[in-house]
Image (cartoon, rainbow, N blue to C red):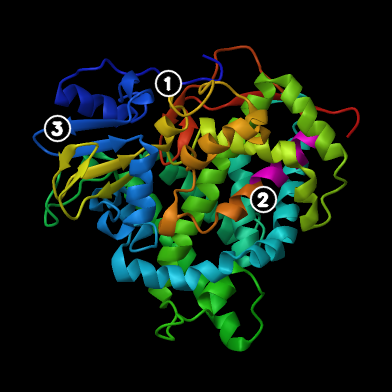
Amino acid sequence: MIPPKPASRADRVSFWRYVRLFRQDILSAQPERLYRARMAEFRTPFFHSFLCNDPALIRHVLNEDPMAFPKSARIREGLSPLLGRSIFVTNGSIWARQRRIIDPAFEQSRVKGAFPAMRAAALAARARVGARAGSVIEVEEETSHAAADVIFRTLFSIPIEDEIAWQVFGAFRDYQRSQPLLNIGALLPLPQWLPRFRKRRTRAAARVIRGLITRLTEARAEAIAAGDAPDDLATRIMTTPDPETGRGFTPAEMVDQIAIFFLAGHETSASALAWALWLLAAFPEAQARVAAEAAGAGDFDDFAVLARLPFTRDVFRETLRLYPPVPMMVREATRAGRFRDRPVPEGAQIVLSPWHMHRHERIWDNPDGFDPDRWSRRENARSAREGFLPFSQGPRVCPGAGFAMAEGTLMLAALVGAFAFSLPDGPPPVPVAHLTVRAAAGIPLRVSRRKSA
């Protein structure tokens, strides 16, 4: 299928067959009917879950009564060695305090202030790709490099070529390749006292990443104390007090938050950018429109350039629909209730799947097709409002959503404006879920310079 979509499993399989499929890839472990169903209920000896594709249920869980459906503890099973108690995994008053401190750093004015760093990273990525023009490149590697560069420049005002930044990037790459978004602990309710037998490579990579982040954070704390710290995201977050208590993050808390910024800001952007470039290579007419738009936007001198790239933004948005970087979110019901006239017991796992919502046959016209123009057609407004949640919704919407959209649009314009991307010989990439939706065997693309660039 073009765009590529993983095969689904048979409708009924044994639990242990499901576990084996789940461990390989959570996307292909799901049945085909989830692309049509409004809700699906799963019962096993170890968990009781409901996958919700009904927009009304999504609103209820994420917007109307979010405190009754906190993030499931099972989501922390695979991520706690890296993320600790970061905002991605906490709930309740701890999460609310973290959000009060972090949100001001991602206001629209702050994103505008980060634009020069984004632009510098985009131009650096363009130069790196230019050095390999005329060959087939592994796009996921390039977009990972570019997205990491954006994070380092906007968080700590250092390019990825900085020695510590480069070490963090390498360790994070090892972590991403060895850690799925959901591990077996998401299926089996293991008691807290039971040791977790995680991969040695995963544990080692997490330790390296947190150690390097600690060095960066401690150096920034010293610069803040000396009064010569740059005005970037790290400084803003480290110097922002909780408006209710007057206290900011401790050094240990800051390490947790920086870790999730690397995960959410680097890994997700890299995934979306790689898929966007593949889609543009597969659909040359759309690529030509992005290139023309970029040519008319100048050299991206200021934040206002993003307003001159509407089609490029829609390409990135359509990529997020087809390949949402975080394909599933898991909440837990803290009290009994009813979903679509079915009883939902306390403790049930509530699975919200952007992957299935974004391709749902009841919500989208041509759900598996690549159609960037759908975002400018009025008849699709309801689908966009009810069936699109790459950054979640409600109080727990990703604070960096605006940042990610600006970064993705700018990076696409910078690269496609300078280079033509085409498909090499071979089968299309197969989407699988690691930490984010990646390609099972990478995304190779042929790159050549545009004559007009």
- Which secondary structure lies at badge 2? helix
Question: Magenta region's main secondary structure?
Answer: helix
On screen, residue 271 above or below 391: above
* Residue farthest along the right direction in this orientation: 452
Q: Residues within 10 Å of mark 1 (few under 14, many from 20)?
A: some
Are dots 1 and 2 in contact, CB under 8 Å? Answer: no
Q: Residue at x 45, y 51 (%)?
A: 393
Whether residue 140 can be seen here? no
Q: Is residue 409 magenta?
A: yes
The kind of residue tagged 1 is Pro
The kind of residue tagged 2 is Ala
User: Considering the image in quadrants, where does the C terminus appear?
Assistant: top right
Q: Which residue is mark 2?
A: 406
Q: Which residue is mark 3?
A: 43
Marker disc for residue 6? 1
Q: Is residue 71 magenta?
A: no
Answer left or right for 338 relative to 256.
Answer: left
Residue 190 picture location, percent across and down: 14, 47
Report the magenta residues as a range.
408-419
